[in-house]
Image (cartoon, rainbow, N blue to C red):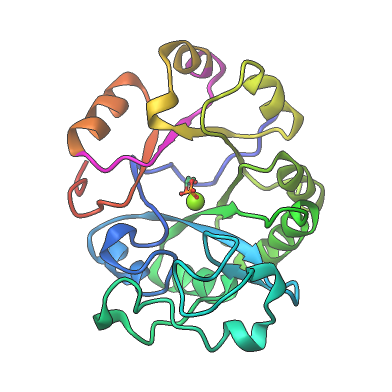
């Protein structure tokens, strides 16, 4: 089985939602912070607006992380462009915009950050989100090393795979299901991404034997991270990029 792989070595710690807890999640503000702390890769979540434009946001609704209201997939770009995605964290970040995928991709390229793009489709938009994000990745990264692309939605991964056969994919789940390898094979996924607390040693052993990297979220304690890496986990996603520095 040929599993398209990233043209880069996966670093041991990946800044979660751009800059972890040191900036409002999934914002441009997190990227220079992650880079300044020496991180080489960031993860962030991508969802489509009502216009079909990819934006970087975690929730299907705007309330938790912005001053907007309603569903991301029901809100046009003209409204999303006006939203504040920083003030919810701290007033020092007031005015931080909700970023488009394009803006985050360009900032990653400028800062030399590698990316794990998590396709986060709103319910019912799995296929179109997978296709759109994959297409935009090819346009935005061009000849540069492509990001690793993951999703909890297998439908989104299948759609991304159809658009971009060369894309490195990550099969993302909370607890790996019994047939996780078969599900990975269906999209020729490169890596298995799962919740750290749901990872058991039998999954790790099977993955190791098959040469499949395992990436775990979300690991905020340094000792926990060290223990996971010692067990053979390839990388952890962390919000506490201050505490896990240098691992
Ligand atoms: O991709 C790893 C992790 O980000 C998955 O969970 O909910 O934080 O996007 P979530
Ligand atoms: Mg995510």
Residue for point 25% across, 25% down: 227
Relative to 199, is 151 above or below? below
**Viewer-closest of 38 and 237:** 237
Q: Is residue 215 left or right of residue 173?
A: left
Does any portion of residue 142 appear in the rendered image? no
**Viewer-closest of 29 and 143:** 29
Estimate the x, y position of residue 112 in percent, counting from the top left: 41, 65
Residue for point 70% across, 32% down: 188
Tell me the quarter of the image containing the N terminus: top right
**Viewer-closest of 171 and 112:** 171
Does any portion of residue 206 appear in the rendered image? yes
Residue for point 69% across, 61% down: 133
Q: Quadrant of residue 132?
A: bottom right
Estimate the x, y position of residue 147 in percent, counting from the top left: 55, 53
Q: Is residue 186 left or right of residue 207?
A: right
* 216 within the magenta span: yes
* 171 within the magenta span: no
Tell me the quarter of the image containing the C terminus: top left
Q: Is residue 88 left or right of residue 220?
A: right
Q: Which residues are magenta?
A: 207-221
Estimate the x, y position of residue 202 in percent, counting from the top left: 47, 10
Q: Quadrant of residue 5?
A: top right
């Amino acid at each position: 089985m040929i599993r398209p792989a990233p043209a880069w070595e996966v670093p041991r710690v990946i800044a979660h939602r751009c800059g972890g807890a040191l900036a409002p999640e999934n914002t441009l503000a997190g990227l220079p912070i992650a880079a300044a702390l020496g991180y080489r890769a960031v993860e962030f979540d991508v969802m489509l607006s009502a216009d079909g434009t990819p934006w970087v946001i975690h929730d299907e609704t705007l309330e938790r992380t912005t001053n907007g209201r309603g569903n991301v997939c029901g809100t046009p770009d003209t409204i999303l462009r006006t939203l504040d995605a920083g003030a919810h964290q701290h007033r020092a970040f007031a005015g931080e915009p909700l970023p488009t995928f394009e803006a985050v991709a360009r900032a990653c390229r400028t800062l030399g950050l590698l990316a794990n793009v998590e396709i986060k489709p709103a319910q019912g938009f799995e296929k179109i989100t997978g296709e759109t994000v994959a297409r935009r990745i090819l346009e935005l990264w061009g000849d540069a090393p492509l990001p690793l692309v993951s999703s909890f939605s297998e439908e989104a991964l299948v759609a991304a795979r159809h658009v971009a056969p060369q894309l490195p994919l990550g099969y993302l789940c909370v607890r790996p299901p019994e047939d996780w390898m078969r599900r990975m094979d269906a999209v020729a996924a490169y890596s298995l991404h799962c919740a750290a607390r749901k990872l058991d040693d039998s999954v790790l052993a099977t993955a190791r034997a098959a040469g499949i990297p395992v990436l775990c979220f979300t690991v905020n304690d340094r000792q926990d991270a060290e223990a996971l890496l010692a067990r053979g986990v390839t990388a952890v996603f962390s919000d506490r990029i201050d505490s896990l520095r240098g691992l």
